[in-house]
Image (cartoon, rainbow, N blue to C red):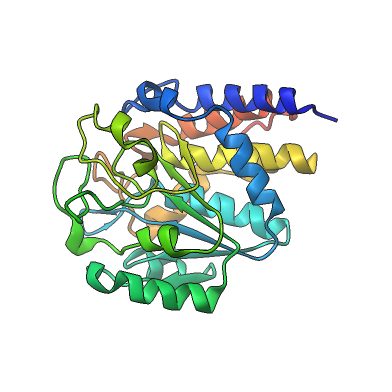
């Protein structure tokens, strides 16, 4: 049996691995978080048997970016394989792209004023026991959404923030730059970055160089709890190819290609390989 100290050490190794590139300053802000955040979040995930909402989708160039949906799909598939009940929550155009293959719930675009109302309706209907946000735009102090370029993208965004603040269940958020839901937990630290920071908070914030990789960090720990290499089932290239056919773009290059935040899919594959090594799982040759 793995001891609590050993689990914390594994979490620290995962946390270091996932920000080692420091693409958007996540390694710089990491000291603002209490060590063991991947461990704590995965424990929460394993303890949840009811509905798990996974909010994702960041609007870019009239469509959706690859970072976020790749990790959300990987996590969704993992949870389904364990008999849990995930639901992807997203706005258009991602909702229409995914709803034929996954259980999805639609939230409206450009409707911040009514977000509290429709969120309360959704929470009553879905009765979630855990809510996870992966690369969702987060509201700023100006009550708007901004992208990495500092552009106001509010008219293209669905509001998922109130799922965090109004839910009567634990909330987890994954982000990689400072303008995503959950970054309000480390608002002062994020203020040092060249970004319009998000103020929306969550119970447990996870950071990574690419938000998709944060989902892999969670799945790594779930693999440990289950004594089963669930990471081996993740094929980033295949998920990216699936999303590309549906019209995705890379959030940085704005091109329809098999990349995430400007990085080749092989970088995600390497992260999965390294996570397997950290967790003592038999590595899978992707």
How many numbered circles are shown? Answer: 0
Place residue 62 in its image quadrant: bottom left
Residue 135: x %, y % from top left: 39, 48
Horizontal relation, residue 235 to residue 70: left or right: right
Position of residue 108 relative to residue 260, above or below, is below
Residue sitting nearer the eye, 257 or 146: 146
Residue 96: x %, y % from top left: 38, 71
Q: Which residue is drawn at 66% across and 60% down?
A: 80
Residue 23: x %, y % from top left: 33, 26
Horizontal relation, residue 89 to residue 251: left or right: right
Horizontal relation, residue 157 to residue 202: left or right: left
Seen as rendered, the residue at the extreme right is: 1
Position of residue 156 relative to residue 18, above or below, is below
Q: Which residue is drawn at 24% across and 45% down?
A: 254
Question: Which quadrant is the N terminus positioned in?
Answer: top right
Question: Which quadrant is the C terminus positioned in?
Answer: top right
Seen as rendered, the residue at the extreme left is: 151
Position of residue 209 relative to residue 219, above or below, is above
Horizontal relation, residue 23 to residue 87: left or right: left
């Amino acid at each position: 049996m793995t001891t609590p100290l050993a689990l914390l050490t594994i979490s620290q190794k995962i946390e270091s691995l996932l920000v080692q590139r420091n693409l958007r300053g996540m390694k710089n802000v990491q000291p603002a978080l209490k060590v063991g955040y991947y461990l704590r979040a995965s424990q929460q995930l394993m303890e949840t048997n009811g509905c798990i909402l996974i909010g994702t989708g960041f609007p870019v160039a009239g469509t959706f970016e690859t970072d976020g949906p790749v990790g959300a799909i990987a996590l969704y598939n993992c949870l389904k394989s364990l008999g849990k009940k995930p639901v992807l929550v997203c706005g258009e155009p991602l909702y229409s792209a995914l709803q034929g293959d996954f259980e999805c719930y639609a939230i409206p675009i450009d409707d911040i004023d009514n977000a509290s109302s429709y969120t309360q309706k959704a929470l009553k209907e879905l009765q979630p026991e855990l809510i996870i946000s992966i690369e969702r735009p987060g509201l700023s102090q100006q009550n708007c959404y901004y992208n990495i370029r500092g552009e106001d993208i509010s008219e293209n965004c669905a509001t998922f923030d109130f799922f965090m603040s109004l839910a009567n269940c634990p909330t987890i958020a994954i982000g990689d730059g400072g303008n995503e839901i959950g970054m309000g937990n480390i608002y002062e630290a994020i203020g040092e970055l060249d970004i319009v920071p998000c103020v929306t908070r969550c119970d447990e914030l996870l950071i990574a160089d690419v938000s998709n990789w944060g989902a892999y960090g969670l799945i790594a720990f779930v693999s440990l709890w289950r004594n089963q290499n669930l990471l081996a089932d993740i094929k980033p290239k295949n998920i990216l190819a699936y999303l590309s056919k549906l019209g995705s773009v890379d959030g940085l290059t704005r091109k329809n290609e098999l990349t995430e935040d400007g990085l080749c899919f092989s970088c995600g594959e390497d992260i999965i390989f390294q996570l397997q090594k950290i967790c003592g799982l038999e590595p899978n040759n992707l």
